[in-house]
Image (tube, rainbow, N blue to C red):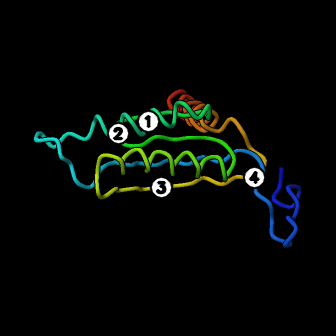
Amino acid sequence: MTRAEVGPDVAGRTAYGGGMLFAFSVAPAVSEDTTGSVSAAVAAAIAVVRASGLSNRTDAMFTTIEGEWDECLAVIKGAVDAIAEVSPRVSLVVKADIRPGFTGELDGKVERLEKALDFRSTSD
């Protein structure tokens, strides 16, 4: 689906329909844990993500969610709010892949990469 096929919204801008990927990292900027660990606070934020019902994946550095613009930003805000309950300062990093009309990209992008790596290893 091209950007033009998504269509303009009421203000004439292009509407971003379909799935979007948001990778984010949220953590206390100030840890009250004497070991410096932020695991408990981050777990509270990830619980918000998992309760959202959005497709998600968490790794050692980021959590990636897939959905519509407003629902993803609401989940990120909820994760920040969870951290803010235990820290007076919150660190947030967000990266977005906005590709109108595409869904299932949380897995799709990785699958295409793996196929490219397989092709590369068999053609060497």
| Label 3 sits on residue | 94
Type of amino acid under label 3: Val
Residue at point 27%, 55% (across, down): 29
Determine whether 115 is above or below 31 in the image.
above
Determine whether 72 is above or below 109 in the image.
below
| Label 1 sits on residue | 46
Image location of residue 3, percent across then percent down: 81, 59
**CA–CA distance in space, label 3 to label 4:** 19 Å
Residue at point 32%, 40% (across, down): 41
Image location of residue 89, percent across then percent down: 30, 58
| Label 2 sits on residue | 42
Q: Nearer the viewer, residue 87 or 76?
A: 87
Asked if residue 18 lies left or right of residue 74, the reply is right
Instruction: Report if the CB atoms under discs 2 and 3 are less than 8 Å apart.
Output: no
Q: Point out the tag, 1 or 4, that comes first from the N-terminus.
A: 1
**CA–CA distance in space, label 4 to label 2:** 30 Å
Q: Nearer the viewer, residue 124 or 87?
A: 87
Image location of residue 117, percent across then percent down: 52, 33
Type of amino acid under label 4: Pro
- Please name which of the two marks, 4 or 2, marks the residue nearer to the observer: 2
- Please name which of the two marks, 3 or 4, marks the residue nearer to the observer: 3
Asked if residue 20 lies left or right of residue 64, the reply is right
Q: Point out the tag, 3 or 4, that comes first from the N-terminus.
A: 3
| SS at circle 2 | helix
Q: Point out the tag, 2 or 3, that comes first from the N-terminus.
A: 2
Instruction: Report if the CB atoms under discs 1 and 2 are less than 8 Å apart.
Output: yes
Image location of residue 44, percent across then percent down: 39, 36
